[in-house]
Image (cartoon, rainbow, N blue to C red):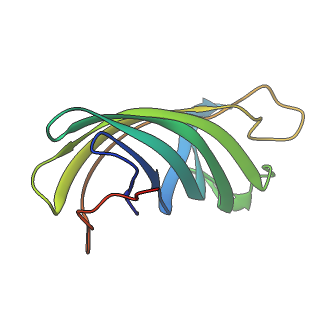
Amino acid sequence: MADIKFSENFSIQPEFVYSAQGYEQIFNDQDVKAKIDYFNIPILIDYTVIDGLSVQVGPQIGINLRAELEGESQETSKIFVKNIDFSTVVGMQYDIDDSFFIQGRYALGLSEVRVNSESKHSVFSISLGFFIDRPSQTIED
């Protein structure tokens, strides 16, 4: 993740995120689990509300890495999903100090997960992370 500051309260935060997603359901009296993993690239507008607390919003593109279906009495099989997923993300971030942060986010899928399906992703996440090298200066005109 990067934090590109344009002012004291406003920045752009592009990220690279691995996301293990999926669902579980009962199908033909069997517990079935779908594992659908993505490499997500959110590009978020970050606005600092008060010192350390910011709200975030922006688009996200996901690249499918794995799509498998596991059942109780069957071998793992492939699920046919779209290779690209588009979402919009809203959330909050609290900077514990200059290095550590905690985030809460909701990603609402805008595109179908599978071909000819109305199903879309809906993902809530909580993250704890750190900046390796976070610059303190802002970009000036």
x%, y% of residue 27?
66, 32
x%, y% of residue 9?
29, 39
Q: Would residue 140 appear left or right of 62 to someone viewing this image? A: left
| Outermost front residue | 141
| Outermost right residue | 116
| Outermost top residue | 118
Q: Residue at x 20, y 52 (%)?
A: 101
In the image, residue 43 sits, relative to residue 116, either above or below, namely below
x%, y% of residue 2?
40, 63
Residue in the foreground of this view, choosing between 13 and 40: 13
Q: Is the N terminus in the top left, top right, bottom left or bottom right quadrant?
A: bottom left
Q: Residue at x 57, y 56 (%)?
A: 41
Q: Would residue 129 appear left or right of 117 to someone viewing this image? A: left
Q: Residue at x 16, y 63 (%)?
A: 99
Q: Residue at x 68, y 59 (%)?
A: 63
Residue in the foreground of this view, choosing between 79 and 50: 50
Q: Quadrant of residue 3?
A: bottom left
x%, y% of residue 128?
23, 53
| Outermost left residue | 97
Residue in the foreground of this view, choosing between 123 and 103: 103
Residue in the foreground of this view, choosing between 71 and 136: 136
**How many labels were placed on the picture?**
0
Q: In which quarter of the image is residue 87?
A: top right
Q: Would residue 117 appear left or right of 21 to someone viewing this image? A: right
